[in-house]
Amino acid sequence: MSFDQIAQWVDQAIEQTPVLDLHTHLYPPSFGGFNLWGVDELLTYHYLIAETIRATDIPYDKYWSMTQQQQADLIWKTLFIDRAPISEACRGVLTTLGKLGLDLSSRDLNSYRAFFKSQKPEAYLETVLKLANVRQIVMTNDALDPKEREIWLSGKPIDARFKAVLRIDPVLVGWPKVSETLSSFGYKTSGDLGSTTMSEVRRFLNEWIERMKAIYVACSLTPDWRYPDDSQTTRVINEAILPICRERNIPFAVMIGVQRQVNPQLRLAGDSVGKSDIKSLDRLCATNQKNKFMVTMLARENQHELAVTARKHRNLFLFGCWWFLNNPSLIEEMTKMRMELLGTSFTPQHSDARVLDQLIYKWDHSRKVIAKVMKEKFADLEKTGWKVTREEIDRTAKEYLGGNFERFLSLTPS
Ligand SMILES: [Zn+2]
C-alpha cells in the first residue's frame, strides 16, 4: 500500500472514531454549577492563571479579589492581546473558539461572550460532543464534597454518556483529619485507623461505588509516595481499597507525581511536578496481582521506566499524557515510545478537561499527534514487506481511543 494511502486511512480512522475520554473533571448539565463551560471559564483555567500571573506584577490578593469576568479580561489582555498566545493552553482556547465558528480575527472577547450567553447547557453539550467527537466522558467524583453528595443522594438520573469515578484522595492521604469528615457523614471512624474505622472506610467505599456506579476508584499521589511502608496510606490501600476493588473487579487508578502547592498563593494553579519512585509501583502491581491498576505519571523523567513497568505487569493499564505533559512535543515523544514498547496495549490520551469546551481542543490537538505517530509506525510496518490493511488501522484507532480501556475494565485478573 502507498504511504499516502496509509496516511489517509490513519487520518480518517483517528478523526472518525469517537473517543471514550477516560479521565476528565467534567459533569453533565444536571449537576448545575459543577458543569463549567463558556469563554470566561476557558480563560480562567488554572493553566492560564499561572501563565498570566507570571507575565504581570499583579499582587496575588488583587488577582483573587477580582470577579471571574475581570480575571478573564486580564488574562485575555495579558496573554492574547499584549503577547502572542503561543502557549499550548492559549492555543487551546483559540482552537476551541475557532471550531465553534467564532471569528478569531476580531479578537473581540465581548462578542465571544455574547455567543456563549445565547447557548443553553443541554444543547451546548451536544454541540461540544459532536465537535470533539467524544462518545463517553469519565468524571471525577468527590463523595466528601457536601454539594456533590447532595446531588448523588437526590438519586436524579444521570446522562448515560457520563460515567462516575470515586475519587478518594483524602481517604488515602488525609488521616487523621478525614476521620472528622467521615464521622460528620455518619461513619464510625476515628483518626487512629483501628479495625472499626477500617471497616467503616470499606463501608464508605462500597456505598459510594454502588451509588455512583463508579467504574474505578482514583487518587493522585505525590512523588514521595512509597509502597509498601508503615504509613496509614499503605494500610488504607491494603485493608480497604484493594479488597473492595477486587470484590467488585474495578481498577484502582493512581496518578503519581503531583507536588502539592509549591506556591500556595496560586491556589489551584499552585501544584507542580516531581519525579516519583517506580519501584513502589512495581511492588503494588506484583504483590496484588488480583487487582487491576490504571496508572499515569506526571514527570517526563518517569515515562520510560513506566512504559517498561507496564510490560512487566498485565494488571497495569497505562494511560494518558497528564497535565504538564499534555503538550504536543511531549505527547509525540511519549506516544512513540509507548507504541514501540507496548504496541497497541495502552491508551495514549485522556483530556483532563475541567471546562466542557476544552474537549474540543484537547481532542483536536491530541488526535493530530496520535495520527502523526501512527502514520510513521504503520509506514515502518509497510517497509518490512507486511501489507498494512485498512482494517488493522481502524481497529488500532478504536483500541487507542477507548477500546483498550473497555477491555481492561471487563477483564478479571487471575
Ligand atoms: Zn485530572
Image (cartoon, rainbow, N blue to C red):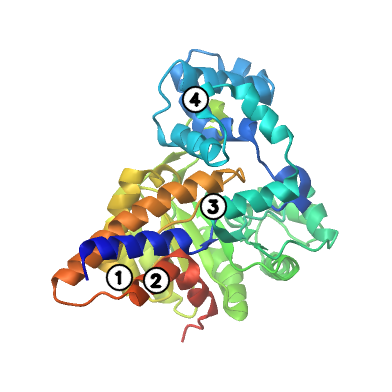
Say which residue label 2 marks. 394
* Between 107 and 67, the one nearer to me in the picture: 107
Nearest-to-viewer mark from 1 and 3: 3
- Distance between mark 4 and mark 2 Cα atoms: 37 Å
- The disc labelled 1 sits on which kind of residue? Gly
- The disc labelled 2 sits on which kind of residue? Asp
Q: Position of residue 297 (x, y in %)?
A: 40, 54
Say which residue label 3 marks. 132
Res 105 label:
4
- Given contact means CB atoms under 8 Å apart, are the residues at marks 4 and 2 in contact? no
Residue at image position (60%, 59%) is 137
- Given contact means CB atoms under 8 Å apart, are the residues at marks 4 and 3 in contact? no
Q: Is residue 228 left or right of residue 110?
A: left
Q: Is mark 1 within 8 Å of ligand 1?
A: no
Res 74 label:
none
Q: Position of residue 128 (x, y in %)?
A: 61, 49
Label whose residue precedes the other's in the sequence (1 or 3): 3
Say which residue label 1 marks. 343
In this view, 115 is above or below 126: above
The kind of secondary structure element at disc 1 is loop
